[in-house]
Every structure is written in C-alpha cells, then in structure tokens.
Image: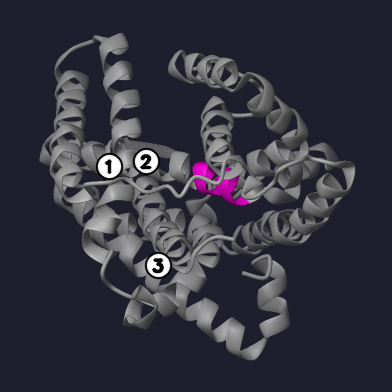
C-alpha cells in the first residue's frame, strides 16, 4: 500500500510535470501557417526557449514513465495470468478508452476547423477530408493527430509486454537495466516503442516490484548539490549546442541532465513539502485535472501559437511572449473546461479521462 505522503507527492509532481510538457510543446522558433514556414532569427529568445524546452522540461516524460512503471508493479510479488488479465482490463478503461476518444475527437475537430476559410490556413498537414481509410486507422491507432498521445500508445505497449519486463527484472535485473541504458544513450530505434519509455518505465517497475520507499536521506543537502549540477549540465549543453558541432558531447550532457534532473525534482519536492500536508493547500484540487490538461493542450496550443503569430507578427519578442504566455492560457482554459465538464457531465468526464 502506497503511503499518503507518497500518493500526494506523485499527484503533485504529475501536475508539475504536465505543466513542463505544455511548455516543452510551446517552443515556437519555427512556425507553419498555410504553405509558408518562418524561422525566428537566433537571439536571446532562441537561447531561453532551448534552455527550457530542450533542457529543464525534458525530465517530464522520463519521470512520467517511471511513475507509471512504479504504480503498475507496486506490490506485485508474482505475475500470474489472472494478475495480467486484471491489469489489462483496468488499463482498457484508464488508457485505451481515453486514447480512442481523444484521437478520434481530434480528427473530427480538425475536420470542422478545416471546413472554414478563416481557420483552414492554420493547418499544414493535409486535409482530413482527403484521408484514406488507412490514414484514419494510422491517425487513430498508431500516429495520433494529438501527438502527445504517443505517450499513452507506448504505455499501452509496455502494459502488453509487462510479463516479460517482470520476469526480466526478477531474473536478470542488472543486465536488463544495463542493456536499456545502453539503447537509450545511443538512441536505439525500437520502431514500435521509444527507447526512453522502455528504460524509464522499467526503472520505475524495479522500484515498484521491490516496494522501494523512494526516499532520499539528507535531502536538504542533496537539493543544493543537485540543483548546481543540473543547472551546470543544462547550461553547458546549451552553450555547446549553439557554439559547436560536438553532437556526442551534447548527447552526453543531455542524457546526464535528464538523470540528474529526475532525481533533483524528486528531492526538490521533499525540500519544500516534507513538513506540509499538501492536501490542505489551495492548489491540491488542481491535481485531478492533470490528465485532462495532457489530453486537451494539443492541438489547442499549436492553434493558439499560430493565431497569436498572425495577430502580433513574427519577431523575436513576439516569439518569446507567445512561448511564455500561451501555455499559461491553454492550461487555464483546460482547467476551466475540465471543471465545467466534470460538473455538467461527470460520467462522460470520467470516461474520457480514464476515471481520473
């Protein structure tokens, strides 16, 4: 049984991570409107967006997969056929049903917007009306139009192969982790599965299977050390990215920054909230909207970026302002829509969010 503090911590971090994801996707150094493509000239804006979207926020997806693996396997001592069936059945409700709804809904949403002359120019990936049956299947099941759903697609695949992961962890844990670390570092292509999702889901699974309390002692001292190391790695990576062509060094710094960043945010939470009951704070009620923000923010974010570009022009300053304020606006809209839907149509809301 997961203790209350850890349960609240996972909810709080998940909400913070989805904010990271929205900012990650807010990067707008190249914008496509209609048939034209514009690239913002390099300057302070480029560096700020790179540091945030290609540095700080890159810890979000790996930690999401770790949390998913931890929760999936927590307390699982043996992986029987009945255990597998139970978990598959549960994930049909929490993953597959929302996945099918949102990927299908986005196609319909695009179709409607592409039907109006004033909104049609904002779409650059072909018209929905020109899709073949194969295109529909691919866009719903394999390569979803709301691209963030690759995360759910990979998660469903990981659930399907969970018995292999369980027995691999139980029998040859170090070998499995070493192999997955190698494929992640050298960016091996699994074709149907991301090397990042496989590695970090497996790492989370290890903590879940062995019921790790996930506590780090002396976290106050560690937060200072980790903050310094993480910041240094991100700044160094950014410097080399803009000033050299040392791709291997940049990749090493990137991977190191992700590992350190994942540990940092885990310790950082304890530093601020170890002595606080976060369930009594005003922000706690927002955490239940995490999945809805994940599902809702695209394509709304992309459409909003293009709309603001068309209104205020394409300059370095406008790019930075759009980068900062559009994610905040989209998150606020998502929370308002989620709150309203949950009030008016609670059963429907539970269906499309996997009962979250």
Q: The C terminus lies in which quarter of the figure?
A: bottom right
SS at mark 1 in the image: helix
Image position, residue 105 (x, y; %): 69, 62
Q: Earlier in the sequence, mark 3 or mark 1?
A: 1
Viewer-proximal residue, 306 or 147?
147
Question: Image check: 54 left or right of 291?
Answer: left
Could you tell me which residue is drawn at 61 percent across and 41 percent down?
Answer: 209
Residue topped by disc 3: 331
Could you tell me which residue is drawn at 32 percent across and 37 percent down?
Answer: 38
Residue 215 in the magenta stretch? The answer is no
- Which span of residues is magenta-colored? 65-71
CB within 8 Å, label 1 to label 2: yes
Residue 59's mark? 2
CB within 8 Å, label 3 to label 2: no
Q: Quadrant of residue 301?
A: bottom left
Is the residue marked by circle 3 packed among few (<14), some (14-19), or many (20+) residues within 10 Å?
A: many
Query: What type of secondary structure mainly makes up the magenta span?
Result: helix
Is the residue marked by circle 2 packed among few (<14), some (14-19), or many (20+) residues within 10 Å?
A: many
Q: The N terminus lies in which quarter of the figure?
A: bottom right
Residue 56's mark? 1
Could you tell me which residue is drawn at 28 percent across and 49 percent down?
Answer: 267
In the orientation shown, which residue stands out farthest toward the bottom?
344
Image position, residue 15 (x, y; %): 42, 62
Could you tell me which residue is drawn at 34 percent across and 69 percent down?
Answer: 329
Whether residue 147 appears in this view of the structure is: no
Eye-nearest disc, 3 or 2: 2
Looking at the image, is 172 positioned above or below residue 106?
above
SS at mark 3 in the image: helix
Looking at the image, is 87 positioned above or below residue 51?
below
Image position, residue 83 (x, y; %): 82, 48
Viewer-proximal residue, 112 or 171?
171
């Amino acid at each position: 049984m997961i203790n209350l503090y850890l349960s609240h911590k996972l909810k709080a971090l998940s909400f913070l991570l989805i904010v990271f994801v929205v900012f990650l996707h807010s990067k707008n150094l190249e914008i496509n409107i209609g048939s034209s493509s514009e690239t913002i000239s390099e300057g302070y804006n480029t560096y700020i967006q790179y540091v945030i979207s290609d540095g700080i926020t890159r810890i979000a997806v790996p930690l999401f997969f770790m949390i998913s693996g931890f929760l999936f396997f927590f307390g699982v001592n043996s992986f029987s056929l009945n255990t597998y069936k139970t978990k598959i059945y549960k994930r049909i409700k929490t993953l597959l049903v929302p996945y099918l709804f949102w990927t299908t809904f986005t196609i319909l949403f695009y179709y409607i917007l592409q039907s109006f002359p004033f909104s049609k120019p904002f779409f650059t990936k072909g018209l929905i009306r020109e899709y073949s049956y194969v295109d529909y299947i691919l866009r719903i099941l394999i390569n979803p139009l709301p691209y963030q759903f690759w995360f759910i697609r990979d998660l469903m695949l990981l659930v399907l192969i969970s018995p292999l992961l369980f027995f691999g962890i139980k029998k040859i844990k170090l070998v499995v982790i070493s192999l997955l670390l190698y494929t992640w570092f050298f960016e091996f292509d699994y074709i149907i599965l991301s090397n990042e999702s496989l590695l970090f889901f497996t790492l989370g699974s290890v903590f879940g299977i062995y019921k790790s309390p996930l506590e780090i002692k002396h976290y106050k001292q560690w937060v200072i050390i980790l903050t310094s190391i993480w910041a240094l790695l991100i700044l160094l990576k950014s410097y080399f990215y803009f000033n050299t062509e040392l791709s291997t060094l940049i990749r090493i710094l990137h991977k190191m920054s992700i590992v350190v960043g994942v540990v940092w945010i885990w310790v950082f939470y304890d530093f601020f909230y170890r002595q606080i009951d976060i369930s009594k704070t005003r922000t706690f009620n927002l955490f239940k909207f995490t999945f809805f923000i994940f599902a809702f923010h695209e394509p709304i974010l992309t459409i909003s970026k293009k709309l603001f570009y068309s209104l205020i022009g394409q300059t370095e300053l406008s790019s930075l302002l759009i980068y900062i304020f559009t994610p905040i606006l989209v998150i606020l809209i998502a929370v308002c829509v989620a709150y309203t839907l949950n009030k008016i149509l609670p059963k429907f809301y539970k269906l499309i969010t996997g009962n979250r």
